[in-house]
Image: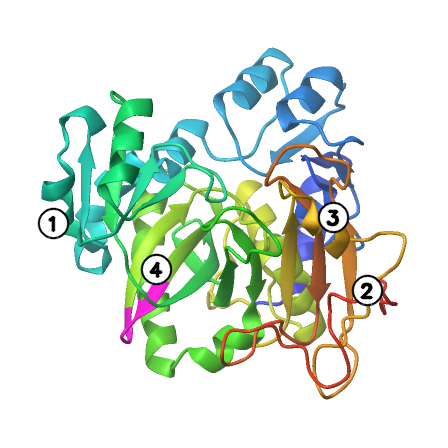
Amino acid sequence: MLTNKSVIQKINKRLGKKTLFYVCRYPERARGLEDLLKNYKIIYSTPPQDTAEIIKNKKFSRGYLAVFKNNSKISRLCQEKKINLINPDWQLAEKYENKISQYQWLKKIIFKNLPKTTIVIPKNANFKSLTSLLGNKFIAQFNRSHTGEGTFLISNKKDWKKIKKTFPQRQIKCVEIIKGDPITINACVWEKNILVGNPSYQITGRKDLTDFEFSTVGNDWSYADKLLSKKNKKEIERLTQKIGLAIAKEGWRGLFGLDFILNNKKLIVIEINARQPASTGLETIIQRKTGPGLTMLAAHFASLLKLPFPVGQNNQLQKINCGGQIIIRKKKNGSSDKVLDLKNKLNLIIARRGPVYGKIIKTDIQTKKINAEMGRIQSFNQGFIKNDKKWNEGKAGNWRRHENIKTLKQ
């Protein structure tokens, strides 16, 4: 069995006296192994700054530098400052993550598992012809979109006219609406090996947490484990392996994520996230609390540092079937501010068995940017969603109450 301990030992040996710097907007993205890695420093600023700005204004000693997601500005700065950036090439990340180039690439690999899609210039596209292909309602996405902000529901001619008027020449991807359960998975490319993580239910568009219908506001491993059949899990593994091997051939290494919709027992791939998924840290913590197997973040660092994959070992990560998190985003009317009241802590009593052990993380509580992340509520041993997809509040209380929270030291 490939253990977390054995891989951490190899990472520490590779680092030697050199430091592994992780530069990020939110320190939570880099946490999960900080007590095990000997020469590891998480670099961030308060209030949060873009990663490129932090790199620009800081001096780095000899070592390695990792970021949440590489881009052209970060790569240029690292070259200028002669910093050893270990993330995959930013051009690969854009190719896989931008909505239009992503679809054009994915359709060559898993066409049967993609939703009906067409790419158009709005001024040249007729609403009637789009609905005849995609249905009475459809989704429109610009090439670059983050946490659902560049994604629109087109439900009538008026909606499409608004897009045509505002962005007549901007290429847009139009996709049929697939009804079902949103599932996401984290995975890692380590040499030619694709290590597949644990499926989580993707909590999306909750009105008490975001103003955006398609924004991600949490993950729930507990609910996904109950929801997915063995056949579903095998199919997720198969599709993730297939996509992972394709990006590995093009030079990708380290973490990536996939979003699915489970529709009538069929899994439809919605998108690939060519970066470290934001749930990596929590998945790593839950993996460590569950067993000795390899964790997501350890596999990521081993791959980025180009350690050889251990001979004769399987490519299995530590399995988990519990835990979850809620992401609180800034809303226009400020109601989400009340959810994350940092003067009072929250009681996370959401199940009949008693309190949930977890923590509250404040990321950018003072932000004025609409839909920016303000904080997270994390559970290490239970989920937040129950079978009818409502909040799992339990008899004892409600996670939204302003009471006390039990926290665990990591």
Q: Residue at x 23, y 60 (%)?
A: 113
User: Percent position (x, y) of residue 405?
Assistant: 85, 67
- Evaluate if marks 3 and 2 touch, with contact meaning CB atoms under 8 Å apart: no
Q: Which residues are magenta?
A: 261-266
Which x, y percent locates residue 19? 74, 35
Q: CA distance from mark 2 to mark 1?
A: 47 Å
Q: Secondary structure at mark 2?
A: loop
Distance of label 3 from label 4 (alpha carbons): 40 Å
User: Which residue position holds label 4?
Assistant: 241
- Could you tell me how far apart the alpha carbons at marks 2 and 4 are, in whole angstroms? 39 Å
**Pointer 2 residue:** 346
Q: Is residue 264 magenta?
A: yes
Q: Amino acid at mark 4?
A: Gln
Residue 123 shows up from this direction: yes
Q: Main secondary structure of the magenta part?
A: strand
**Left or right: 158 with respect to 188?**
left
Residue ID for mark 3: 337
Tell me the SS state at disc 3.
Answer: helix
State which mark lies toward you, 3 or 4: 3
Q: Are marks 1 and 3 in contact (CB under 8 Å)?
A: no
